Image (cartoon, rainbow, N blue to C red):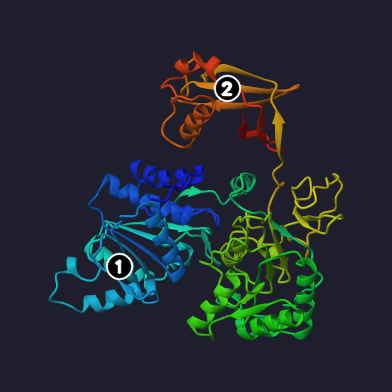
Amino acid sequence: MLNLQDRWYQTEAETSIFDYFYSGKVGNPIVAMPTGTGKSIVIAKFVRSIFQRWPGQRIMMLTHVKKLIEQNASKLMDVWPTAPLGIYSAGLNSRDMILPIVFGGVQSVAKAIQRGVKETMIPIQHQHFGYRDLLLIDECHLLSPQEDTQYQYVISELRKINPNLKIIGFTATKYRLKQGELTDEGLFTDVCYDITGVESFNRLIAEGYIAPLFPKRTQTTIDLSGVGLAAGDFNNKQLENAVDKDEITYSAVREMCEYGHDRKAWLVFASGVDNAEHIASMLQSFGVPSAAVHSKLGDKENDKRIDAFVNGEMRALVNMGMLTTGFDYPAIDLIGMLRPTLSPGLWVQMLGRGTRPSPGKNDCLCLDFAGNTRRLGPINDPKIPRKPGKGGGDVPVRICDGCGTYNHAAARQCICCGIEFPFETKLFETASSDALLAGDAPMIEWIDVGRVIYNLHEKKNKEGVLMSPPMIRASYFAGFSRFEKFIGLEHPPGRFLHDSKEWWRMHHCDEPPITTWQALQRTNELRWPKKIRVWLNKKYPEILGFEF
């Protein structure tokens, strides 16, 4: 079994699903986690936990891309090598139907069910995939509330066999185009876990789980004044005509070469098949090894080009609608955006291709020639689509005079070069609302510790009754500065209790005591850290790590 290091948010995400149903709720919850934070690990550990508690369960996981099926199945086998797992996907040439766990592609599964229901001589509980207790849907933002979709067909057929089928969604974008939140209408009812917001996203960056995105101001712009709308987004044909012009392609490629001279892996988003080919050809003329991938090429040729990019045989890969979701290549450190969109979900998914950390990679540079950020906002604080008439407009930002990087309006210093903004900094409310990260970039420092004091901490109401279990307050002093951390060994299961026990194990060689009082009697046995790693620019500075 592969030893996968537990991450606090992955444990929280898994626990939140159980907590949701243990609390008596009967809906269909969503787990929302940014791209690159390991949803496949959460899915794998959740499935394993289900079978540890209730061995007779039957589970199906659906998604729409074969790469995601492979990725999720691989992680499950890493976590649980003996899992009774089958895969049903035409693209993967695998058609396992009867195993307790089936990971499949929704298109293949829907066709299999259609064939199965025609076998009228077979009892309904034995048709196609049989009885299923749980249905997990990865990239669940793609599930439409319309009843005539493949997802809805599969769900309706599975519910004919088990009316109490529970459905759990996983996504990095918990909203749809022009329809607001996924929970506004349709299948999903609640969000049981969400770390896609500003503070959580920035914490993930600070702790090294996500690579930051840095936007640079571009000179190349795209005129969309003549582009109409279709199905809630830009008209595809008109959009490609507006974007696929020699002067735009040349200018954008020149800027990519200028800004990306030290970047190793470029992923470019195009607005059409011809546009993708023209961009790739222009990159090659600039001496950048590159290729295009799109729907007019066969699967084998696309896979061959993608493999060449991943193996380092080419520096840039230009795609049209091929790599917006399910493409996991952490080394991507430059995104060239020539695909304007009105969909915040598509926008965040595209940006997410660059947020995975990788050895030697500090950040990902994004060159947004499409102007998406002024329409849709930053990756960690996008403008959630509302129904018509429910608001809109651009978000003001700051532009750094030192390096030309776009910053959120609330930032007090540049996320790229660190220059502090004076209070009078001009706010631009027009085309310059291009901040890819909202709020201040985390300020993390290692601080020398002079002494440590441990005290009892209790929260009581006016009547003197405890409102929560007692805790230890550890005060770390650095000169005249004091940084505090609270340790709760009597709190209910969850992230706080998990972190508290890990804190004790770092400071002591034995397992933590059961009660806070017992722990306080042994604080003289704890070792003092030489340094603490502190997130400073928060309302309450947070201790992230220790050096002994």
Question: Image point 63% across, 34% down: which residue?
Answer: 542
Direction from residue 153 to residue 413 in the image, left or right:
right
Task: Report whether residue 327 is seen.
Answer: yes
Instruction: Let me know if residue 226 appears in the view.
Output: no
Rendered location of residue 403, percent (x, y): 83, 57
Residue at x 14%, y 73% (from the top left corner): 122
Q: Which mark is residue 289?
A: none
Is there a contact, CB below 8 Å, between mark 2 and mark 1? no
Q: Is residue 493 above or below residue 267?
A: above
Considering every residue shown, the one lying at the far left of the view is 121
Badge count: 2
The crowding category of the residue bearing disc 2, from other C-alpha atoms within 10 Å (few below 14, some 14 to 19, many at least 20), is some
Q: Position of residue 119 (x, y in %)?
A: 18, 78
* Dot label at residue 156: 1
Residue 302 % position (x, y): 53, 79
Which residue in the structure is indicated by mark 2?
A: 527
Q: Nearer the viewer, residue 150 or 204?
A: 204
Q: Nearer the viewer, residue 354 or 423?
A: 354
Query: Residue placed at 58% from the left, 70% from the top?
Result: 311
In the foreground, 492 or 226? 492
Q: Is residue 383 left or right of residue 285?
A: left
Q: Label 1 is placed on what type of residue? A: Ser
Q: Is residue 49 left or right of residue 542?
A: left
**Label 1 environment density (alpha carbons within 10 Å; few <14, some 14–19, many ≥20):** some
Image quarter of residue 544: top right
228 is higher (above) or lower (below) than 328: below
